Structures are given as structure tokens and as C-alpha cells.
Image: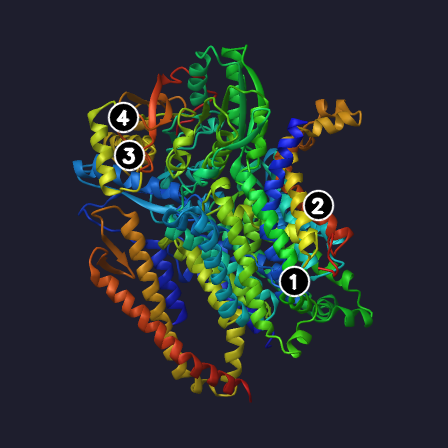
Amino acid sequence: MRAVLPWAVAATAIVALPFTFPGGGTITILNQMAITITFALSYNMLLGQGGMLSFGHAVYMGLGGYGAVHLMRWIETDGLSIPLPLVPLAGAFVGLAFAALVGLISLRRAGTTFAMISLGVAELVVASAVIMVTIFGGEGGISADRTMGPRVFGSQWFTAAEVYWLIAGWAFVSALLMYLFTQTPAGRAANAVRDNAQRAAFLGISPARTRFVSFCASGVFAGIAGALLAINLEIVTDEALGLQTSGEILLVTFLGGVGHFAGPVLGAIAFTLVKTVIGLETPFWGLYTGALFVVLVMFAPRGLAGIIADHLDAVRRGQLGKLMVPYLLVTCSGLAALLGAIGLLELAFHLREAGIGKTALTLFWTGMDAAHPLPWVAFATLGVAGCVLCYRSLPTLRARLAEVRTP
Amino acid sequence: MGITSRIRVLLTAAAFGTASLSFAAEPVRVAYIDPMSGPFASTGAQGIAQFRYAADVLVNEKGGVLGGRPIEIVGFDNKVSPKETLIQLQVAIDRGIRFIAQGNGSHVANALNEAIVKHNRRNPDKRVLYMNYSAVDPVMTNEKCNFWHFRFDANADIKMDALTDVMAADADLKKVYIIGQDYSFGKSVASAATRMLADKRPDIEIVGNELHPIGKVKDFTPFARKIMASGADAVITGNWGADMVGIGKSVIGAGFDGPIYTFYAASDGITRTLGADGKGKIRIIGPGSLNPPQTERVGVYVEGFKARHPDKDVAQPRITHVVSMLAQAINDAGTADDVAKVASAMEGMEHDSIWGGKVVMRAQDHQAIQNVYVMAHSDENISHDLDNSGFGLLREATVEQAGLNSPTTCDMQRP
Amino acid sequence: MDWFLINLIDGLVTGLLLFLLSSGLTLIFSMLGVLNFAHASFYMLGAYFGYQISGALGFWLALLVAPLVVGGLGALVERHGLRRVHAHGHIPELIFTFGLALLIEELVQFVWGRAHVPYEAPAALAHPAFSIAGNAVEAYKIFMILLALGIFAGLLWLVTRTRTGLIIQAALTNPQMVQSIGHDVPRLFMLVFGAGTALAAVAGVIAGPVLGTFPGMGVVLGSIVFVTIVIGGLGSITGALIASLGLGWLTTFAKASSFSGADILAAIGQEGVADTATGALADLTTVTLPQIGDVLPYLVMVLVLVLRPSGLMGRRET
């Protein structure tokens, strides 16, 4: 029962979300989120469960996407009678094939050797994508029309909303399969090899073969994520397999927490929200994301899932009350510091970019005048006071946390 | 406030954005989808400033469109990524925006073009128009032309045709070296240059035709050495951004003396960086010329812009055409919602450019036909400089109504 | 011959520049075990500080001051950031430098803008020193070569001939032992990190005028520095030099050549294939060496790692 509950919640959320937030733009964000979740979970099969740090995981997603987009083109031009919901299988196949190929040469060692080989392979694949225009379409990518296949469930997949059910469904099934994988002997062996490869070898588990199995499985799901991306946008370009995408998924997975199966899911949800919602409001989303990661890694290196896990424990032992006051202090002062810093940055940016005479702006739903000293003073005071208070109240929080953690 | 309601607030904020209403009447909104963060953000920031200024000065201060509705430019950051662009397009459509302006990156433009065709076919009640103010891949007004796309810049073939006309007139020119970025635009520049030079001046030898990876080259010196060794009299390049600065600096640094013909070697810090070294060497081809100004209006317009944005330039003259012609088309059509009517009004429109000369939106392929100029990077006789560097673009040659009779393979399908 | 000579000099400049970056990184990597993704960001900071300071104090003082400032920043980052994260393992450290790189790039854009800044070589060196067959070689490039060689000699002396160097070498292999005989290893880590970033900043100050100073300059160089130290062997300064020079010449000669896929086919007597090829095969036959010159180092790295995981001069496996 306890194992089924989270999945039931997830399934309910998938069905309920589009109806809860019917506003325009929601479906676009949800589709994005589902794809990122699938991709992040597949990445964590390597990083969290297998202890393999990859700098080139987007390669498998990108290639899976190209596989799917080519299949959709064949459906259109050659009239293949393959329904759209089966197209992700093409992505899975391409992801698996390439992962098996790269796995053959790169898995003798984990650690830096594996990481650097993954980086090198990623650069080489990106370079090939630019050169082999026939397959990858150059920087313009390959586009297709998803509506050309046979009709399924009465849907021709015209709108993002129709596609949502397909993407969310595949993401759910993939997540479930990835979870089941962790319960198989192969999944357990991956954990053993991650923790101590030498010991695992003594126990008769071949580290290289164990890594190979994880790596191939991870390639399959990355390929599915790529295919979902291809279905969603009907185009795949070389950025899907690029290094930036690879770096991003490392950050997403880490943000969520590599130590817990649901961590990457949280990371993907949070990151998609940050990128789409904050990205629409400010050109500094990159700055804020960078700062977020630096702060997170310094204060919560186990990610969002780690934070939650810590407190679930405290809740179970009925000790959450002890944490309330210091939390309130740290959160409020931290938010004030954040608000102050963001405010100053946005004011300065507005003054520089909007042009002379255009000093009015809306920040945090409040109208203000960037030429007037008042908002500057207000934000600066808020920021400094927040910083000082936050810094002062942190030790208390740490002490209480330590107290709560030791039973 | 619970987590769900917090998310709902975030999502609602995303959906409705920050529409600022300065007019009582509902504004006609134009989504500007271009880079606002990342390495190409300065181009995007320049562009949106020019769009907003053009909307204010050319339309809103004169009473707006449809009897008092202002034009509002809403920025969407696409990070010059096709994927992000399509997501932002979706968000813009969800917000009820019907006019899309985009210009940076032919790959982005092609992805956007295809997505808009599909969207308009599948959602006849929510169609959108695409104002392409800067992407010059010829494909978009040939094989992939469509009723919803309008191009306001001269396309790469038209520019190259004008440029090779000017080059062909130079009797001393014997050897030309072509170098560009390894992608569709770089390739189309190279093939157009080879084809047209062979046609106009068969005696000119193409001594080098080279592609390099886009945005990845750390040091252009080896390429510059090859250009020197080839004995070229002139260089043609379609490079932009850091790749333009890189090739320009290293070719000049290696001691090259002849003209370097470019498409994008101006503003965004490039003029300032090339500075005195580029004088007498860098040439640029494009529409819209400011030194000397051809009309009184444009001088006033540019000075007004510099008064508002002292650190920016009016680097993309055709933005004034986009805004003016869109306003005109909306007024002629009498609607800002039925974009098919607006598109019909735009077809064949003749417009008196504030930059001088006439702009015609050719109906058969939606390519704007306008004067194209060859301009030199210089600090003499410059009344309007770029990057506040004292250097600007001095008009050297004019090709009137460039590409007026240029062929197109477009078979325009009208709804 | 002229062609060879001129590219030999250009490749030397590229290689030595790479060495300034990789020598610092290889020390940091082998000592702290961190894949420092922000290393190229410190290089960029060096260029921007060089530009800013040379505007006020002139180029020569900037060459001295900018690396000191950036090195100080690096030491602060190690002291107050990395050291904290160190306890949690290598991946959090890596994420920290990842986030830091993002942060530095965005801050640079905020302060100096997104476009190129006009950072120029000092007037005293901005003239051709000599020319080979019409190709000018600027005096500034000769200066870059001499400076980098001087730094290599200094580093080698420092690491192999001084007491500090011996402690560093000892700490590389066995930090606990060094700590227990009374040396302040955390302080040593901080110094090495600061010195490494200062070296990167030197590279930035002297490369800025040649390669352009813009927010993307760190990313362009980015991972190639890792490639260099992995090929050279972790912790080996001589290995870093050999790998840097090798990669400098490899990329320079690749770009300077004009081989294409069709030439290779012709060389093995298969001319016909190139003429009849279609699709992906045709893409391969038309590709030229200059087109792929900048990705060759990655190919070399993959081959090295598969065949000899300790790198060229490394004594232990990566």
C-alpha cells in the first residue's frame, strides 16, 4: 500500500492539473515538465543509482529525438501506418543502440575517466550533427508533422492539450518502469557498484557489466524523453543533444536530490517553473539560477528531496515544533534579503535599458519610479537587514536541526 | 497560502504577464521573440528598444491604430534557441497575441515559420502573422514561403546580388576569398557569391571558400594566414557576433589590406572593437543608410532615439518599416484580430521609408523590395556614429530597389 | 616552409595560452579533486579586470594587478565556498563551480554589458615584429610566448626545487600525512586555488586583446582546458605543457590545412566514391579538416582515455 500511494498521487495529479489550471500556457509548461521529469529520472539512473557522472547525457535524448522525428517524417512521406503513441519506441531504440555503443568503450572505470569520455563523446556527436546535414538537418534541425499518422483514440494530435495526455502517459509509464528497475537485481547491483566497486567485484558482481546494464537502460529512457520532445515541438535541433542540455540536466537532477528516487521529479518541476515563469519576467533568470545553485549546494547539498526527507523524520518524531521559530526567522529574513537584492538589480537594469525618461516600472506587482531614491533605499535597507538577520539566526537553526536529527 | 494556490498565482502571473495600459483603448500587442539573455542578448536588447521607440514615435504619438489603439511590444526571451522559441510562441498565442516579430538566427526563423504555418492550419480562429525583420535565409521567400510570413530585410541573395554588382565594377579585383560560419546562412552566402561572381566577372578567381564551426573558433589566426597566403584582393564573410569580430581582427592583424565585405560588422560593440583598424577595410551591405542622412525625418528620428537610449543604436533600420507598415495594414484591414485581412492589406503595400526611398512588400513572395547600400566603416563624414565610437557607416554605393525583378520559386497559397 | 613556420609560431601562441590555463587547473584538480568548471570564468575575469585596470593604470600594471585581484577572489571562493562544500563530496563541489561559472558570466554581462569591450594591446607592442612571406607577426605575440615560457620555468622551479613545492607534491599524493606532520593543508589548498586562478587571469589579461574580450570568451575555451589536463596527465605540469603545445599545434595546423574527406578517399585510391556519394556519405566526403579542427582535441582525449587512462605524463589513473 505504501509503495502504491505515491504513484496514485502522481496519476491523480497528471489527470487533475490541466483542469485545475485551465489558463492558457499551463499545458505548454506541463508538457515541458513531463519531458524534463523523464529525462532527469533517466539521468539519475546513472548519477544517483549508478554513481556515474556524465557530461553528455543529452546525446541519448537528442538522438532519440532525431529517431522519432525521422519516423514521423516516414509516416508522412511513405504513409507508414504507425500511430503516434508508438513513436517514442523509436526514440527508445535509438537511445539504447547508441548507449550500448558508447558503453562498450567507456565503462571500465567510473569517476573522472567516465565523465571525461562522456564529455568527449558529446563534443564529437555535436560536431557530427553539424557536419551530417542529411541526418541532423544542420542548425535548423529536422521538423515533422505529428498529425499524419492514423487516428488513435479519436485524436489527430492537433493541439498541445491532446498531446499532453500522450506525453504525460509516457512519462508516467517510464517513471514507473525506472522505479521497478531499481528493485531488480540489476538495479541493486548498480547501487552496490556505486558504493564500492571493489567489494562488489569480490562478491562476484562485475562492475563493468553492471554499469553497462544501467547505462543502456538509462539510454532507453533518455531516448523516450527525446521522442516526447520531438512529438511536442515537432522539431529536433542540435541543441537537444548539446552540452548545455547535458549540463542543465545535471543541475536539475542535483537540485531535486540524487539520493532519492523522486528527487529528480521535484528538481524537474522546480526548474521548469523557474525557467518558464521567471524567464518570462526577467532577463536575469540565468543569474538567479546560478545563485540558486551556489546557495543550494552550500546549504542543502542533498537537494529538495533531502530537505523533505530530513523533515519527514522530524515530523514522525513530533519534533517539527522545535524548528518552527528559527525557520520562520531564517525564511523571512532570507526572503527579505533576496527581495532586496533582486529589487536593486532590476532597478539598475531598468534604468539602463528602458531609456531616458522611462523610469516607471512594475516590480513585485508594485508600481515605482527608478529615478526616485525611495525604492533604492527601501530595497537596500530590506536587503541589508535581511542579510544581517539571516546570518544571525542561522546558527540557532543549525543547532536545532542537529538536535532534531540525533534521536 | 497553500502550495497549490501559490503555484496557481505563479501560473496566472505567467499567463497574464505585466500588461501596462497607458491608453484607455486596448493595445494591439506584438510579441517580440528574440534573445534577451545569454550571449546574443545585446542584439535582442537593441532590437526591442528600437521596436518600442518606433511604436511610440511612428504610431502611438500619432494616435495609434484603429482610431486610438496603441501598439504595444511584449518581449519574449528565446535565448536564440529554436526550442525556446516554439515554447515562447505558444505562450504568446495563449496570451492572445496575434502578431509575432522575430529576426535573429535563420535557424530560429525557419523553426518559427514552420510552427506558425502548422498552427494557423490547425487553429483557424487563432491565426498569427510573422513579421520577420532580420532573418535573411532565401528559403523563407522561396520554397518555404507562405501567406503568414513577411520579410522586411533584403534576403541574402538580394544582398549578394547588389554586392557583386558593386564588386564587378572594380576592375582591379582579381582574387576573392570567401569564409563563413558552417551553417545554412554561411553556406548560402558562399554559394550565392560563387554563382554570381562567376556570372558577372568570370575572370575573378575564388581563391578560397571556407567554412568554420559557428561560435566555437577560439583563434582565427590560421584562417587569416591562409587568406594572406592566397593573395586575395577581397574577402567576403557572412559572419556575425563574436565570429565577425574574430575574423575581422585577425585578418586585419595579419596585414590584410583589401576590402572585407560583410553583412553584420556593425553596432553591438563590433564597430567600437574594430575601431581604427577597420577603417578603409570593412564594408557592409544592407538596407538603410544614415551617413549622410537621406531625409530630414530620419535625422530627427535617430537623434530622438539616442536621446532616449544614449548607449544603443538604431542598428536595424527596417524595424521602422515593420512598425509603420503593420500599423498601415491594420488600419487598411480595419481589424487587428482577423490577421488574414491584415496580411492581404500588407501584400503589395508601398511605403515611403523615413530612411529615403520606397519599400514595396512584393505580393508574390512577401519579400520587401528596397534600396540596398554598400557602406564603409569610417570616421570621416560621419554625422551618426555607432557604439558612440566616432566610427559609423559611410554610404559608398546605392542599388535602387534591389532585387525588384529577382526570381522566386514561391507558389503563394492564400486562404 | 614559410607556411610551416608561420603556423608553428601561431600554434605556439595558442598552445602556451592553453598552458597558462591548464597548469593552474591541473594543480587544483589533482589537489582538491575538483573538476573546476569556473576556471575559464576566472580567465574571463582576468581579461575584464585587465581591460578595466589598464584603462586607469596602463597595461603593464594591469598585467600585475589583475591576476592578483582575481587570485584573491579565487582564494576567497575556496575559503568560503568550496571548503564548505568539500565535506559533501565531489559532485556537490562540481555543481558549486558550475553555478559559480553561470553566476560569474551573468555578473560580467551585467557590469560590462553583453557586447565586446575595446581592450587593445599596448601601443608599444602593437606593431609587426617581423613578417614571413607577407604575414605579419605582431610583437605582442612574441611577448606572449616569452611571458608564458617564463611562467613555465618559474612554476617548474617552484614545484620541484622549493620547500613549498615539495609540500605541494606531498599533499598531492597523501594529504592526511602532510597534515599530521604539522602542515596547514587547508591553507595550502586555498593558496593553490588562488595561484591557479591567478594564472588563469594572467592568460585572460594577455589573451583579451588578441582573442577579443566578451562574455562568451570563457565558454568558448571552456571544456578544452579539461581535455588538456586529462591528456597531459593529472597533476603533471610538464604533461600540461606537452598536451597544451600538442593541442595548440594540432588545431592550428588543422585549420591551416585544406584536406577534405574526398582527399582522403583519393589517397586510398577511392576517388569514385566521392563523386557518387549521396546523403550522409556525401556530407562526410565534403567535410574539411579546418571545419573539424576545433573538435580534434576531444577525439584525442577519448582515444587517450580508452588506451592509457593515466594520460601522457600522469602517474596515477584519472
Relative to B294, is C147 above or below? below
Q: Nearer the viewer, residue A54 or A273?
A: A54
How many numbered circles does the render carry? 4
Q: Residue at 25%, 66% (x, y): give it.
A: A378
* Residue A367: quadrant of the picture: bottom left
Question: Quick one: quadrant of the C terminus of chain B?
Answer: top left
Name the residue that disc number 1 marks. Answer: C30
Relative to B141, is C65 above or below? below
Residue B147 at x, y = what percent?
A: 40, 29
Checking the image for residue B323, the label placed there is 3
Relative to A348, is B261 above or below? above
SS state under label 2: helix
Residue A189 is at least partly visible in this image: yes
SS state under label 4: loop
- Amino acid type, mark 4: Trp
- Amino acid type, mark 3: Val
Task: Give the foreground label among 1 and 4.
Answer: 1
Left or right side of A39 for A103: right
Residue C134 at x, y = what percent?
A: 56, 24
* Residue B366: quadrant of the picture: top left
- Cα distance between the residues tagged 2 and 3: 52 Å
Name the residue that disc number 2 marks. Answer: C300
- Cα distance between the residues tagged 3 and 4: 14 Å
- Cα distance between the residues tagged 1 and 4: 61 Å
- Amino acid type, mark 1: Ser
Q: Are marks 2 and 1 on the same chain?
A: yes
Q: Are marks 1 and 4 on the same chain?
A: no
